Amino acid sequence: MKLQILGTGCAKCNALMLATEQAAQALGLPCELEKVTDLQRIMAFGVMTTPALVVDGKVKVVGKVPSVDEIKKLLA
């Protein structure tokens, strides 16, 4: 599973990265976690508000930091 965090490095982006890591570990999911900070790449996903979470190429969350439990539901 490939997980990407889209954002420029703000506090919310970092919080989403941490929550996503925790959710994946709690579920025992083998995954590749990538932080995407390049604006061109972020815009290529059609995302205009960060942070965003992309799971296997599909944008799942935009503009907010969901709880670890919410992220677990998206990944399960």
Image (spheres, grey):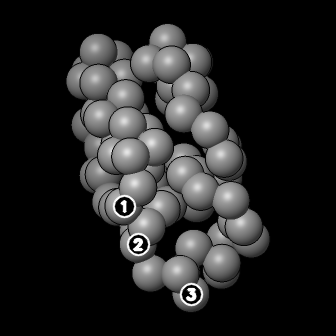
Q: Residue at x 54, y 33 (%)?
A: 65
| Between 75 and 18, the one nearer to me in the picture | 18
Q: Secondary structure at mark 2?
A: loop
Is the residue 3 above or below the residue 76 in the image? below
| Residue density around tag 1, few if under 14, some if 14–19, many if 20 or more, within 10 Å | some
The amino acid at mark 1 is: Gly
The answer to whether the residues at label 2 and label 1 have Cβ atoms under 8 Å apart is: yes
Q: Is residue 60 rendered to the left or right of residue 24?
A: right
Mark 3 against mark 1, which lies toward the viewer? 1
Q: Is residue 34 rendered to the left or right of residue 13?
A: left
The answer to whether the residues at label 2 and label 3 have Cβ atoms under 8 Å apart is: no
Q: Which mark is residue 49?
A: none
The amino acid at mark 3 is: Gln
Q: Could you tell me residue 67's position as x and y percent?
A: 51, 19
| Between 8 and 33, the one nearer to me in the picture | 8
Residue 18 lies in quadrant? top left
Q: Is residue 61 rendered to the left or right of residue 66?
A: right
The amino acid at mark 2 is: Thr
Q: Secondary structure at mark 1?
A: loop
Q: Residue at x 56, y 87 (%)?
A: 40
Is the residue 12 above or below the residue 52 in the image? above
| Residue density around tag 2, few if under 14, some if 14–19, many if 20 or more, within 10 Å | some
| Between 65 and 4, the one nearer to me in the picture | 65
Residue of label 1: 9
Q: Could you tell me residue 22's position as x and y percent?
A: 29, 24
| Cα distance in 3D space between marks 2 and 3 | 9 Å
Q: Is residue 8 visible?
A: yes
Q: Secondary structure at mark 3?
A: helix
Residue 26 lies in quadrant? top left
Residue of label 2: 37
Residue of label 3: 40
